[in-house]
Image (cartoon, rainbow, N blue to C red):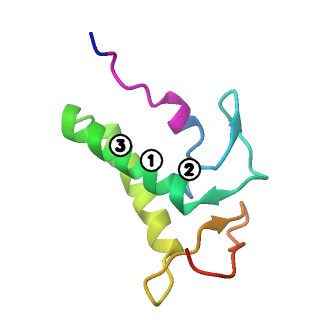
Amino acid sequence: MELPANFSYLRALTDDTGLLQFGFHGIPDLRAGYTSDDNARALIAVTMHYQLTGEPADVDLARKYLAFLRFMQRQDGTFHNCLTAQRTHQDKSPS
């Protein structure tokens, strides 16, 4: 028997910017900031879940993660990976 996916922790660590990198018992750690790779994985998970269930809440999460990735994309098509909670890019070389 398969258990349904539970995205409560994912939702708890997602804010208006995207998915925060770390949390502690569902409390987001703003000091850690965000990463493109975490948001990309979250986008894949909610997209796959939506394809299986049609859950409308998945669309809202997918839009946040996609917007985050678009914000992180550089002019040349590469990506920044790390972003602080103050929306400052932390990395110098592209990901």
- Label 1, on which residue? 42
- Pointers 1 and 2 in contact (CB under 8 A)? yes
Question: Is the residue marked by circle 1 packed among few (<14), some (14-19), or many (20+) residues within 10 Å?
Answer: many
Q: Residue 70 appears at what percent x and percent y?
A: 44, 72
Q: CA distance from mark 1 to mark 2?
A: 8 Å
Which residue is at the front of the view, 5 or 16? 5
Stretch in magenta: 3-10
- Label 3, on which residue? 46
Residue drawn at x 51%, y 83% is: 74
Q: Which mark is residue 19?
A: 2
Give amino acid for label 3.
Answer: Val
- Pointers 3 and 1 in contact (CB under 8 A)? yes
Give amino acid for label 1.
Answer: Ala
User: Is 76 inside the magenta-drawn segment?
Assistant: no
Label 1 SS: helix
Which residue is at the front of the view, 61 or 35? 35
Res 24 → quadrant: top right
Question: Is the residue marked by circle 3 packed among few (<14), some (14-19), or many (20+) residues within 10 Å?
Answer: many
